[in-house]
Amino acid sequence: MSVSALNSGLSGLKAYSRALDSAGHNVANASTSGFVPQQVSFQEQAAGGVIANISKEGSSLASQDLSGTDLANEIVQSIQFKLGFDLSAEIVKTADEVMGTLIDIKA
């Protein structure tokens, strides 16, 4: 574990937090007529880590009377995003413990 692992974990926390926000936005607007749900895609960064891109792609299947939000899909994605967030938190925790041990050894 190194500083790059810590940075990767932190970027994962940000990305998954942003993705969870998007899923919440979609669910909150599920009964809004004509609502076009946000889509989340993840992109690996060259220096390590990940970012979440949020977009409103397509013309949506939503009519003026219906929302384009698929609640079952939003629930599944929310679970995936939470698990990703939890994993990123574990990476940060482990990197912090390793760095603390290294500091103790050098001290």
Image: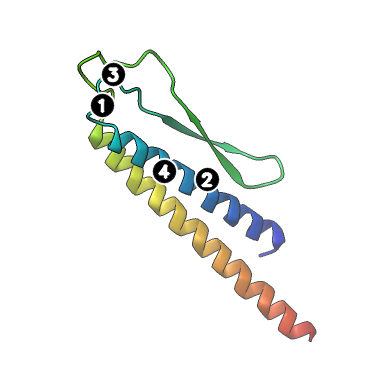
Disc 1 to disc 2, C-alpha distance: 26 Å
Task: Please determine whether, in this image, residue 30 is positioned above or below residue 14.
Answer: above
The picture quadrant where one finds residue 33 is top left
Disc 4 to disc 3, C-alpha distance: 20 Å
Query: Amino acid under label 1?
Result: Thr
Q: Mark 2 vs mark 4: which is more N-terminal?
A: 2
Query: Amino acid under label 4?
Result: Asp
Q: Mark 1 vs mark 2: which is more N-terminal?
A: 2
Tell me how many marks there are: 4
Q: Which image quadrant: the N terminus?
A: bottom right
Q: Dots 4 and 3: beta carbons under 8 Å? A: no
- Which label was assigned to residue 15? 2
Disc 3 to disc 2, C-alpha distance: 27 Å
- Which label was assigned to residue 32? 1
Q: In this view, does 100 lie to the left or right of 76?
A: right
Q: Which residue lies furthest to the right in this view?
A: 106
Q: Mark 3 points at which residue?
A: 34
